[in-house]
Amino acid sequence: MWFTAPYVRKLTDEEKAQIRTAKQAANNTIKAKRKAIQKQIKELEKATPFSKTQILKSLEEQLDELRIVTGQPVYVSIGGETVCLNYELLEKLYRSLKRFSHRTMRVQQGVSLTVEYQTGMVELYELPPYQVELLKGLPVIEL
């Protein structure tokens, strides 16, 4: 269901504090996982210095996929559907679409937030599942 795009407000100090604490906890967990994977990679490289095994390749892929949380992650809710995304990106998108008078918005549960305007469409995807699992206590922004 499409909704007329509401005003995207600034976050309050309390919401920013909630984001900061949730982000720090999630990033600490992600950093610990990255260190454990790096340690496994070093051990495997010592055991087989001249060849890349399948296990080593998969560990390197896991390491590349694990990224720390950046921006201001929040749950955005529109019409009862929610999605966890970077609020900074949504604010920047709205500033760039300010000149368009007709904007509509919808959320696909757990997938993306879609903004349509006169000449096109932009889709903001949800944060990766491992980040969403680790981010606890995020504010819910009703639009």
Image: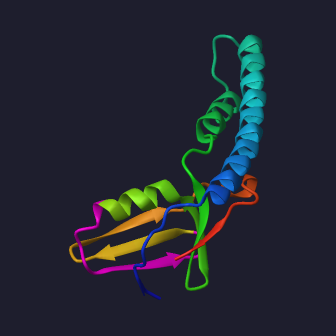
How far across and down, in percent of the image, does residue 96 sit?
29, 60
Which residue occupies the extreme front position in the image?
13
**Can you see residue 3?**
yes
Residue 56 lies, with reference to residue 20, above or below; the image says above
Which residue is more in the foreground, 64 or 71? 71
Magenta run includes residue 103: yes
Q: Which residues are magenta?
A: 96-110
Residue 134 lies, with reference to residue 36, above or below; the image says below
Residue 65 lies, with reference to residue 60, above or below; the image says below
Residue lying at 42% horizontally and 74% vertically, measured from the top left = 7
Callout count = 0
Please state if 100 lies on the left or on the right of 134 as rendered.
left
How far across and down, in percent of the image, does residue 97 sit?
29, 66
**Can you see residue 130?**
no
How far across and down, in percent of the image, does residue 71 sit?
54, 48
Please state if 6 lies on the left or on the right of 65 as rendered.
left
Which residue occupies the extreme bottom position in the image?
1
Magenta run includes residue 128: no
Residue lying at 68% horizontally and 28% vertically, measured from the top left = 56
- Occupied quadrant, residue 52: top right
